[in-house]
Image (tube, coloured by chain):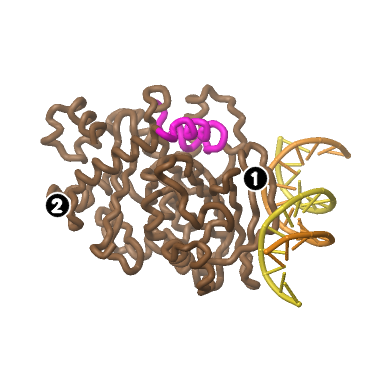
Chain colours: A brown, B yellow, C orange
Amino acid sequence: MTLVSNFFSENDPDSACRSFSQLLAGAMASPAAISAQRPSFSALSAAENGSMKNKEAIDGGGEDDFRLNRPSGLVIAQPPMFTIPPGLSPATLLDSPGFLSSGQAPFGMSHQQTLAQVTAQAVQAHTQTQIQTEYTSLSAAPAASLPQIPSFTSNTATHQQMPQPMQEHNVVKEPSDFSHSDQRPHPSFAIGKPADDGYNWRKYGQKQVKGSEYPRSYYKCTHPKCSVKKQVERSVDGQVTEIIYKGQHNHQPPQSNKRVKDTGNPSNSELGSEAHAGNLNKSKEVVSSYSLSMKDQESSQAAPEQLSGLSDSEEVVDAETKVDERDEDEPESKRRFSCLPNCEGFHHVIFLIYPIILIAVIIHAHCAGT
DNA sequence: AGCCTTTGACCAGCG
DNA sequence: TCGCTGGTCAAAGGC
């Protein structure tokens, strides 16, 4: 909160009298800010292309990172709070009734208070992972993550990387960052079986991929009529660093208690199942994929809709499609991301755009029972 | 016995 | 054509 309040006070003594929209407008007045945010909030591939160029400019160019050309541009080692659901613009978020509400949030904490907490956590988390983040941005993260904030890398140590719009290919890469002690991986994503998403997987291969720190494991869905595959990269300590889903389940997730027992966390299985349930009975020619965010400490309890937020192409991200379908007729400004089915809570996603930091904060409002 | 993981070999795409 | 790389196959072994 100190960071936020300081920023506002330093940049505008009258900030107390200004709305976030006004602040945003001011931030966006900067060409850097504009160029920085466009790729983040747009699915335009052109923006991504531009971002690539920007990255080269930032990095001095010529960095031959094999991942730069990979279609899945979502690999960003970022603190958990920065997951940004697709289809949301800063203005949309800032126009959110919940966000603009100056009163108490329905869950007993004002958004300002929540924002303060989340922001503080974000800053702390980012500080802890900065080294890894920077490393990843060079060696693992697609260029798309950096160019969105062209001036950030050089201006501050607290620069943020934003998720990149959905790639043109139907593969979603889902990185995870469990390096910080206060954001331990979800048990089901930790050592042992691949990320428990409610389906059964059989490992059919493992390969040490060039440029990747960790070996990549290949899994197939064990369902006889399902050809979904996924690739999992796991660090030496068993923590999942990245999951790539390929394909689309054409069956219900097995309703096995064993699965729940294995993970010891039914909510996660439910989470995965929910996401996959959204995939069912959808006929798509394209290979679809979806993602499970494992690095969002809040998302460990969150709805799949939010988990898919790293991607912004609902045409290929089914879980997200589920959201879009539900909110299709709802004004964008009222969009929010609901929690688990039995939870009345929802997520507000707030973008904070500073001249040097672009942060998305997710405020998770649980139902009273949780 | 069945299913799983492991792991070296093989294959295809690309420069 | 050759080498590199990512993805897959399939035999072997474990549970």
Q: Is A132 in front, or is A65?
A: A132
Callout 2: chain: A
Q: Is residue A284 magenta?
A: no
Spot occupied by residue A245 in the image (x, y as percentages of width and height): 56, 56
Residue under the point 53% across and 49% down: A173
The image shows residue A233, relative to residue A50, as above or below, that is: below
Residue under the point 20% across and 52% down: A98
The kind of residue tagged 2 is Gln
**Would residue A159 appear left or right of A13 to someone viewing this image?**
right
Residue under the point 63% across and 37% down: A211
Callout 1: chain: A
Residue A43, numbered label: none
Q: Is C14 in front, or is A37?
A: C14
User: Which quadrant, please, contains the N terminus of chain A?
Assistant: top left
Labels 2 and 1 in the same subunit: yes
Q: Is A115 in front, or is A164?
A: A115
Q: Is residue A252 something one can see in this rendering?
A: no
Spot occupied by residue A323 in the image (x, y as percentages of width and height): 37, 61
Residue extent of the magenta highlight: A128-151
In this figure, which residue is indicated by the disc labeled 1? A215
The image shows residue B1, relative to residue A25, as above or below, that is: below
**Mark 1: secondary structure:** strand
Q: Residues within 10 Å of mark 1 (few under 14, many from 20)?
A: some
Spot occupied by residue A93 in the image (x, y as percentages of width and height): 27, 48
In this figure, which residue is indicated by the disc labeled 2? A104
Q: Earlier in the sequence, mark 2 or mark 1?
A: 2
